[in-house]
């Protein structure tokens, strides 16, 4: 059996795959985000570790004893700053933190070739601008930095004692030469850093170390090998078989991502498309990234007094698609693709006296779907062909939302058995590759199809006016000149 651990933003998920590749057990533990100032988003690294231990130990002890390898996945871009004693110097600055917009401008001025090397435009979500912000605003902290780790790699350090990372996650730092799959001294120097402060780099299926004896004892398993793993999106792609050129997925987690595997490095930073290394050798990928997706569901449920996501979906379905004029712009944490606007915020527009919880809920489902359609349009502008999307993440549980999404993006959505497990599944498969070897196309084959949703022409037509109005609305709510 193989254990995959996903260090998410809202929680840690641990999943065990049996020898047949089926999910044998799961454990989860919740996390919270701290937002002490506008645009800030932080977490305590100790909370990741505590949640990891809780999630793993929630799995049946008999299953834990059978684990032969562990893989890691996690939220990308988080800046975890460690001193010489390997203790965190401050709370980690997360992927959806927007404080470093000025530093992004300065980094691009300092390194004119940054976009060509890193494959991406400098955005506050990336790790490098966060370090530039710390250097300017917290110089006493910056002076003490011995190591910078990504969230899952801090958990790896606690698990194995090793400072290591994989290439897919590290590509999101803005310090990687993505084509060469190696750290860039030029990009590091622009932030006042060196390779000595970076972890060693591995392909996602390579073994980086073994579980420490005291951790293994607490977890009730042998000192098993630990694979490098992947950033959450790349690991999620591995989990559902998106491991060949042209394969594509839609991830509906806290954020929303459209991910397309490519056999070469294809940057398109001008339209805020991400180009990263995949979690497997000799593969890269393109992504459109939307900072708020399923998180919008939790938010509107809270403000409308709905008990939870299931009730919200039911109310939205009762209201029906395009049931009212309401528009929702889902930029609760700013936006990446295609706007690269960390300061923009979400909005409800065109409300009237008949706007109720059902219609507001429906508008939120539509607004997230329209934002994803914007992202797919930008990928297509870059020449990427997407004919269908495999759907993963917590948002994959709602078939009704799938109907709205399919009509908005106008491609077939394929739902796979176990697809809601997400990145933890891919992390477990990377562990299996690391321990047993094998052909990734075989080991990481797509799970069986649960169901698929084709765009309903009538629903496409019903949403057309609202989608056009959605696209017209962004320039009216942004402060960008």
Image (cartoon, rainbow, N blue to C red):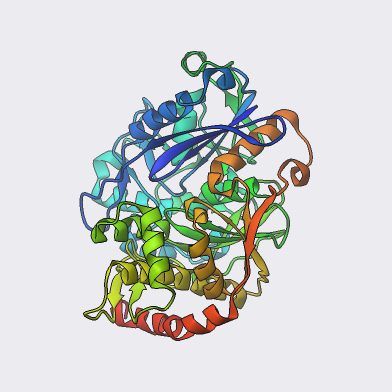
Where is the N terminus found, in terms of image quarters? top right
Say left or right for 78 vs 239. Answer: left
Counting from the top left corner in percent of width and height, residue 305 is at 24, 57
Say left or right for 109 vs 270. Answer: left
Residue 80 lies, with reference to residue 84, above or below; the image says below
Residue 472 visible to the viewer: yes
Q: Residue at x 34, y 82 (%)?
A: 325
Which of the pair 428/19 is nearer the observer? 19
Counting from the top left corner in percent of width and height, residue 293 is at 42, 60
Residue 428 lies, with reference to residue 297, above or below; the image says above
Which of the pair 322/478 is nearer the observer? 322
Residue 367 lies, with reference to residue 287, above or below; the image says below
Q: Residue at x 59, y 25 (%)?
A: 209
Q: Residue at x 31, y 57 (%)?
A: 301
Residue 439 lies, with reference to residue 389, above or below; the image says above
Which of the pair 377/121 is nearer the observer? 377
Counting from the top left corner in percent of width and height, residue 167 is at 59, 46
Which of the pair 245/457 is nearer the observer? 457
Counting from the top left corner in percent of width and height, residue 36 is at 21, 49
Q: How many marks?
A: 0
Where is the C terminus found, in terms of image quarters? bottom left
Residue 344 visible to the viewer: no
């Amino acid at each position: 059996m193989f254990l995959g651990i996903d260090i998410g933003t809202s929680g840690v998920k641990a999943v065990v795959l049996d020898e047949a590749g089926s999910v044998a057990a799961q454990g989860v533990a919740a996390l919270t985000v701290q937002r002490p100032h506008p645009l800030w988003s932080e977490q305590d690294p100790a909370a990741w570790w505590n949640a990891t231990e809780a999630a793993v130990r929630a799995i049946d002890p008999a299953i834990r004893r059978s684990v032969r390898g562990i893989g890691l996945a996690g939220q990308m871009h988080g800046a975890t700053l460690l001193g010489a004693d390997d203790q965190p110097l401050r709370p980690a600055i997360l992927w959806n933190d927007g404080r470093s917009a000025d530093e992004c401008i300065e980094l691009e001025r300092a390194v004119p070739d940054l976009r060509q090397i890193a494959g991406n435009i400098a955005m506050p979500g990336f790790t490098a601008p966060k370090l530039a912000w710390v250097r300017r605003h917290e110089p006493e902290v910056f002076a003490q930095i011995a190591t910078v780790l990504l969230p899952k790699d801090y958990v790896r350090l606690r698990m194995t004692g090793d400072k290591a990372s994989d290439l897919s996650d590290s590509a999101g730092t803005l310090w990687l030469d993505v084509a060469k799959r190696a750290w860039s001294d030029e990009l590091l120097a622009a932030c006042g850093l060196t390779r000595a402060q970076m972890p060693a780099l591995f392909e996602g299926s390579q073994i980086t170390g073994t579980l420490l004896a005291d951790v293994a004892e607490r977890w009730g398993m042998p000192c098993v090998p630990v694979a490098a793993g992947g950033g959450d999106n790349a690991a999620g792609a591995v989990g559902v078989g998106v491991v060949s050129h042209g394969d594509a997925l839609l991830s509906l987690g806290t954020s929303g991502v459209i991910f397309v595997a490519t056999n070469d490095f294809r940057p398109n930073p001008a339209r805020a498309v991400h180009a990263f290394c995949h979690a497997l050798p000799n593969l890269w990928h393109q992504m459109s990234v939307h900072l708020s997706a399923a998180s919008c569901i939790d938010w509107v449920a809270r403000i409308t007094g709905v008990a939870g996501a299931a009730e919200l979906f039911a109310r939205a379905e009762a209201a029906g698609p395009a049931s009212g004029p309401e528009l929702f712009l889902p930029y609760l944490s700013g936006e990446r693709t295609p706007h690269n606007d960390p300061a923009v915020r979400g909005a409800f527009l065109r409300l009237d006296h008949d706007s109720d919880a059902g219609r507001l809920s429906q508008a939120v489902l539509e607004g997230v779907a329209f934002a994803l359609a914007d992202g797919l349009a930008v990928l297509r502008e870059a020449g990427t062909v997407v004919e269908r999307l495999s759907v993963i993440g917590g948002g994959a549980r709602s078939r009704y939302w799938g109907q709205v999404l399919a009509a908005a993006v106008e491609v077939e959505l394929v739902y796979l058995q176990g697809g809601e497990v997400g990145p933890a599944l891919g992390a477990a498969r990377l562990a299996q590759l690391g321990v047993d070897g094998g052909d990734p196309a075989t080991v990481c084959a797509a799970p069986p199809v649960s169901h698929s949703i084709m765009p309903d022409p009538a629903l496409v037509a019903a949403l057309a006016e609202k989608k056009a109005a959605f696209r017209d609305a962004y320039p009216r709510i942004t402060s960008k000149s």
